[in-house]
Amino acid sequence: MIIDPAESSSSALNTNNHRDTSSITFDTTADLWTAGTSWIADLEYATSGNKGSTAQQDTFQTQLNASTTRTYQSRGGKITLHASTTVNGSAADAPPVKMFVLGEAIPNSEITTRLNGLYSGATPGLLTGIAYKESTYYQFFPTATLYGKQGRWPYESYDGGSHIGLMMVPITFDRAWDWYVNTTDGAAVFQDKLATASRLETSIRNANPGLRALTPTELENMALVLYGPFAAAGNTNQYYIAAGSPVDWIINTANNQNGVDYADFIRSHIQ
């Protein structure tokens, strides 16, 4: 039978900046076994709303009367362990055991330092405000339950996980379990929104001769609306709208109050 890991035990991503597990021991009782052991570890992960899922298999061997250790890197979920060997010349399977790889609490200071290093635009720390708004600085929510196991599972969007983690980016396995990937990809999404905001600015200015260029900070506000859940197409649904005589940019509370509030909240919660 499998004696390590124990049934329903868990390991955490507690090494390599909260991205990998420490070494996990795999061992079996061997009093009747006459050969080494073949292991299959079936890893599965799906969000609570099945918005994204993955299945991976890890195979390895242990020698007779010996154990081995494994480390899971930027991976997590439920693992079902199967062990087989030879007993008196016949194949024998141990009863399967399930274990879990869960997330680890990431200190806010480490999150802030990383996010500040990923963006050098007009407003230092702007990504920290996005992370605070989107996830309250959680990559792994401390009391989440998945597969019947309560612990630090990847923090899901309200719809059961179409978006995930610190920056609430679209779900992938890496974005769920590796907060470096999550933040890097979130920063890239924001850069893409800045480019979209610039194109919208050009379109609005072309339609309003004499309208000044947005400042870099104002362009960020446009991008913040586009990053969030109240993004909308069209020149009249952005953070600013062209109005007045002479024409100028005004905050667009008339057409997208929710988007304006979202962007303003981020600016007021930069860490």
Image: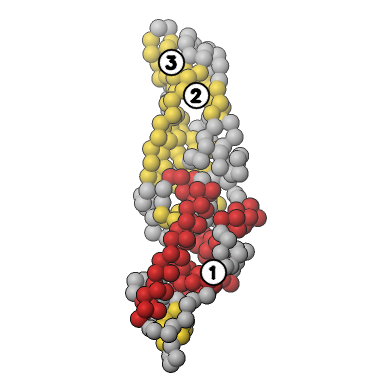
Q: Kindly indicate the quadrant of the structure image that contains residue 241.
A: bottom left
Q: Which residue type does callout 1 highlight?
A: Ile
Labelled pair 2, 1 in contact (Cβ < 8 Å)? no
Within 10 Å of disc 2 (Cα), the crowding (few <14, some 14-19, many 20+) is: many
Marks 3 and 2 sit apart, C-alpha to C-alpha, by: 11 Å
Q: Position of residue 77 (x, y in %)?
A: 46, 41
The label on residue 266 is 1
- The extreme bottom residue here reads 245
The label on residue 202 is none
Query: Disc 3 marks which residue?
Result: 85
- The extreme front residue here reads 210
Vertical order, 122 against 109 (above or below): below
Q: Position of residue 211 (x, y in %)?
A: 44, 83
Secondary structure beneath dot 1 equals helix
Residue 265 visible in this rendered orientation of the protein: no
Vertical order, 91 against 142 (above or below): above
Query: Disc 2 marks which residue?
Result: 2
- The extreme top residue here reads 89
Residue under the image location 47 percent in, 56 percent down: 188
Q: Nearer the viewer, mark 3 or mark 2?
A: 3
Q: Earlier in the sequence, mark 2 or mark 1?
A: 2
Secondary structure beneath dot 3 equals strand
Q: Which residue type does callout 3 highlight?
A: Thr
Left or right position of 53 against 248 = left
Marks 1 and 3 sit apart, C-alpha to C-alpha, by: 57 Å
Q: Earlier in the sequence, mark 3 or mark 2?
A: 2
Q: Earlier in the sequence, mark 1 or mark 3?
A: 3
Q: Kindly indicate the quadrant of the structure image that contains residue 22.
A: top right
Q: Position of residue 169 (x, y in %)?
A: 44, 56
Residue under the image location 56 percent in, 55 percent down: 118
